[in-house]
Image (cartoon, grey):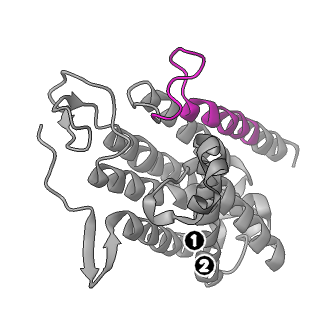
Amino acid sequence: MPFPDIDPIAFAIGPFAVRWYALAYLAGVGLGAAYGHLLLSRPKLWHDDRPPFAPGAIWDFAFWAVIGIVLGGRIGYVLFYNLPYYAAHPLEIFALWDGGMSYHGGMLGIMLAMALFTRHLGGNVLSSFDLLGAIGTIGLFLGRISNFVNGELYGAPTDLPWGVVFPTAGDGIPRHPTQLYEAALEGIALFVLIAVATHVFKALRRPGLVAGLFGIGYALSRIFVEFYRLPDVQIGYLYGGWLTMGMVLSLPILIAGIGLVFYSLRRSQLA
C-alpha cells in the first residue's frame, strides 16, 4: 500500500507551522476532559457515590495535564531513549519542535499531575487514576494516528497486503503500520473494554480497578506491537536479541496494573 499523501503540517501562519502531532495532543486532552466530565457527572458510577472531584474541575486539570504530559514525555525520552546525546548537547533538551517524546514518561508526568491536583482538592487519588485510565485511551488513539501521519515509529518489513511503504524509510519496502496497530489496540479496543467495565460492571466503584485494567491492557498491547515495530535506531534491540526499550518500560506498568486489580478486588471483598 502506498503511504497516503498527508502533510504533517496542518497549517502555517507565516513562519509559524502547526503540526498534526501538536493538534493530536491538544485534541486528546480536550476530548479526554469532555469524556471525563461526563463520567464525573454521574456519581452513581463512583465509590460511595463520590467522584474524585467535581465535574467542572476537569477543565482546570486539563492545563495540569498538558504540563505533565509535555514535561514527563520529554524527560522520559531524554532519560530512557537518548541520554548520551542529550548529556553532550544539554540545550537540545528544550528543542521540543525537533520531536522526541516518551509515552511512558508522559504517563508518569500526567499521573503525578493528577495526584497533586486531586490531593489539593481532597479527593480519592486512586479514583482519579481510574479517571485517567478511562479517558487516556482517547489521547493514545490520536497520538498514534499522528505518528502514522508523520511516517514515524513504523514497523519491520512485511509481505502482508496491508504493508505500507513509508517515504520516511527511504527504501521503498512495505512495512508493518505499527502506529495503526497501536491505535487499534491501545486506543479503540482498550477504550471499549474499559467503557464496558465502567458502565456495565461498575468498575469505578472499586478504586484502582480501572487504572489496573488500563495498565494491563496498555502494557500487553505495547509489548505485542513491539515484536513488529522497529526499535529506536540509537538503541536497537537490547542484549543483542529481540527485547526492546518499549517492552522493558511496559513491564512495570503491567506489574503495577495486575497489582492494582488484585488490590481493588481484595479491598472490595473486605469492605
Per the image, is 159 magenta?
no
Q: Residues within 10 Å of mark 1 (few under 14, many from 20)?
A: some
The residue drawn where x is 61% and y is 62% is 91
Q: Give the range drawn in magenta.
A: 233-261
Give x and y (percent) for residue 234: 50, 35
In the picture of the structure, the residue carrying the numbered disc 1 is 66
Give x and y (percent) for residue 1: 12, 37
The residue drawn where x is 55% and y is 76% is 37
Residue 36 in view in this figure: yes
In this view, the residue farthest toward the top is: 241
At label 2, which amino acid type do we have?
Phe
Return the mark for residue 246: none
In this view, the residue farthest toward the front is: 88
On screen, residue 51 above or below 151: below
At label 1, which amino acid type do we have?
Val
**Label 2 element class:** helix
Report if the CB atoms under discs 2 and 1 are less than 8 Å apart: yes
Q: As rendered, which of 16 and 205 lies closer to the eye? A: 16
Q: Residues within 10 Å of mark 2 (few under 14, many from 20)?
A: few
Q: As rendered, which of 45 and 234 lies closer to the eye? A: 234
Q: Seen in the image, is 217 located left or right of residue 227?
A: right
Give x and y (percent) for residue 168: 25, 44
The residue drawn where x is 58% and y is 22% is 238
Give x and y (percent) for residue 65: 61, 70
In the picture of the structure, the residue carrying the numbered disc 2 is 63
Distance between mark 2 and mark 1 Cα atoms:
5 Å
